[in-house]
Image (tube, grey):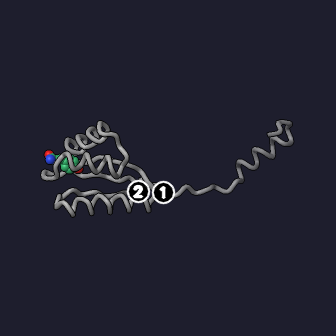
Amino acid sequence: MPQDPVHREETELNVKTRPKTQRPPMYKVLLLNDDFTPMEFVVHILERLFAMSHSQAMQVMLTVHRKGVAVVGVFSHEVAETKVAQVMELARRQQHPLQCTMEKE
Ligand code: TYC
């Protein structure tokens, strides 16, 4: 950028009047604890659908188990919806009561 006073002023003016670019809202995907879903199943879900390593998946699963809920990822609305649907479908197929929801960040 030119740094002489005239050009500097233009640069600052541009910064002030530049239209704000809106970032799309992001969504947290939350996993909820229950008393019945096996721990290994939750770990498997976190590895497969949320690209976590085995030890990372274990840690997050134990956080949900102890605290009741944890954020397992932050995504665009479309991706978050897909992740929630995939978790719910895999749990339903195995007849586990695992619950997964999303909320605006
Ligand atoms: N609480 C479950 C158990 O003791 C394990 C579990 C962890 C279930 C995380 C759901 O999102 C969950 N088998």
Q: Earlier in the sequence, mark 2 or mark 1?
A: 1
* Quadrant housing residue 23: bottom right
Q: Would residue 34 be found to the left or right of residue 104 on screen?
A: left
Rendered location of residue 22, percent (x, y): 58, 57
* Quadrant housing residue 61: top left
Q: Is disc 2 in contact with disc 1, using a CB cutoff of under 8 Å?
A: yes
* Quadrant housing residue 77: bottom left
Q: Nearer the viewer, residue 74 or 46?
A: 46
Which residue is identified by label 1? 25
Q: Would residue 73 be found to the left or right of residue 21 on screen?
A: left
Q: How many marks?
A: 2
Rendered location of residue 59, percent (x, y): 27, 38
Q: Residues within 10 Å of mark 1 (few under 14, many from 20)?
A: few
Q: Taking 47 as reference, is 87 above or below it?
A: below
Which residue is identified by label 2? 104
Q: Residues within 10 Å of mark 2 (few under 14, many from 20)?
A: few
User: What kind of residue is marked 1?
Assistant: Pro
- Element carrying mark 2: strand
Rendered location of residue 56, percent (x, y): 32, 38
Q: Nearer the viewer, residue 44 or 32?
A: 44
Q: Report the residue at 26% width, 48% height from top.
A: 44
Q: Taking 1 as reference, is 19 above or below it?
A: below
Q: Taking 70 as reference, is 22 above or below it?
A: below
Q: Report the residue at 29% width, 46% height from top.
A: 70
User: What kind of residue is marked 2?
Assistant: Lys
Q: Nearer the viewer, residue 96 or 13?
A: 96
Q: Which mark is residue 90?
A: none
> In the rendered view of the protein, which quadrant contains the N terminus?
top right
- Element carrying mark 1: loop
Q: Report the residue at 70% width, 53% height from top.
A: 18
Mark 2 and mark 1: Cα distance apart in space: 7 Å
